[in-house]
Amino acid sequence: MTIFDRLLFQLSHPIQSFYRYWLYRHSIPIVSPSTLKQLCRQWEHHERKQLLTAEERRIVASIQQQTEQFNRDNVTRTEAYFSFFQRCPEVHWAFLAHLVSRNGGWNMTDLKGSLIPSIIASEQIQPLFLFLERANVLIFHDAYPQLLLYEESKRRKKKLFDLLPCFSVSSFMKPFWELFYETNDAPLLTVALIINEQQYIQQNVVKDPFFQQHVIATFPFLCQQWLGFNDVLIPYKSGRHIHLTGITVRDFADVSHRIEVGKALYGMLFYRKPLFRHVYHFARQTKHSGSRADFWPHVFSTEKTNEGMHLYSPRLYDAWPAIIHRFPDRRDWFCDMSIVQEIETIPFMTNPDMTRHYERNLETLRAIASVTN
């Protein structure tokens, strides 16, 4: 990005510009200039594998079968990410994806809970669910085969990343997996996966004409971003209570903003070991159901009969049926080397306590719901 481009962005996106400045007051370099040059050379000379051996075809078929099996709904995807992380804890992105996917499930069930249906028109609920579900399913469809291919490479002690195109994975990713296999450079791979998955859903979800018309451009969607609907909450137990940390996505339609948020979450979680231990303990002890009662049972309940004392937050299976998806023809989003600037650093920020912030958002939503009822 040139100086002129940066100035133009700051003028046209003042909130995002300030937010990025705030995030990057302290940043951590994660890649050397020589490594960047190595990556660029590999991108320029990438070749697609032409013919597969019988054994390679079996590997591809097995990974496709496992991906389809676990891509049934938000609950199975969320658990699959965590199960993989337990098997391969060096792949940090899998745990980050697990936590973000938990939030996706909570947002889906909010649409059938106590508050949101009182605020949003009923005809807007279904498109919002489809938007959340489509992003969740496509990220898993793209990322999970990459995780399994790495795991198989590790098991066989042999790099299998020439098979990535068999899953229509962007050419952007192969050099990072090759490098990770040799160096275990977790931050670099994590940032690459954050960039890749956000660019992928930008192309196939955010820019989709249906979602542009029925979700992105709607007033309720814009309002929700300022009412906490786009809070990414990370629960953890400290003492006797469940606290919340996390971050807010202020402009979901902006892919660069979502990438910055993903990197900030990663820095917050994996560069603060005590916090990571607390969050991992919560994830290991708390099975994901899609209900916010998973983390705050004193506020939320999975039963409507408790609505006098608790907010109703259904389990995913009680709120929404499983959706059969068609997957898009893959066009590689990676066609511009300028994306390299997104790789160089991650923000190092304090661990924000979102507990009171989320309580205030709930109070605001309760007040709005009581007026509209």
Image (cartoon, rainbow, N blue to C red):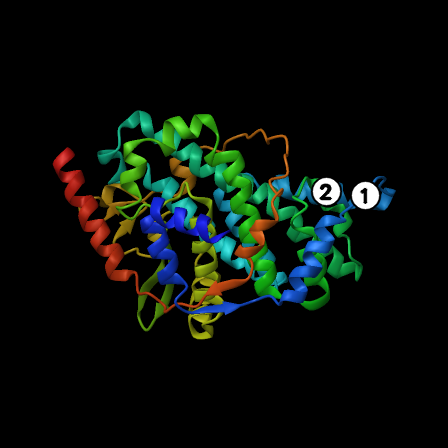
Query: Residue 38 in the image: x percent, y percent?
Result: 71, 60
Q: Is residue 150 visible?
A: no
- Name the image quarter holding residue 151: bottom right
Query: Residue 165 in the image: x percent, y percent?
Result: 72, 42
- Taking the spot 54% from the left edge, 43% from the top edge, the residue there is 199
Q: Bin the neighbour count of mark 2 within 10 Å (Cα to Cα): few under 14, some 14-19, many 20 and up.
A: some
| Mark 1, residue position | 49
Mark identifier at residue 270: none
Label 2 close to label 1 by CB (< 8 Å): yes
Foreground of the two, 140 or 185:
185
**Residue 158 vs residue 71: left or right?**
right
Q: Is residue 69 visible?
A: yes
Foreground of the two, 24 or 146:
24
- Taking the spot 38% from the left edge, 65% from the top edge, the residue there is 236
Foreground of the two, 59 or 124:
124
Comes first in the chain, label 2 or label 1: 1
Q: Image height check: is 192 above or below 113?
A: below
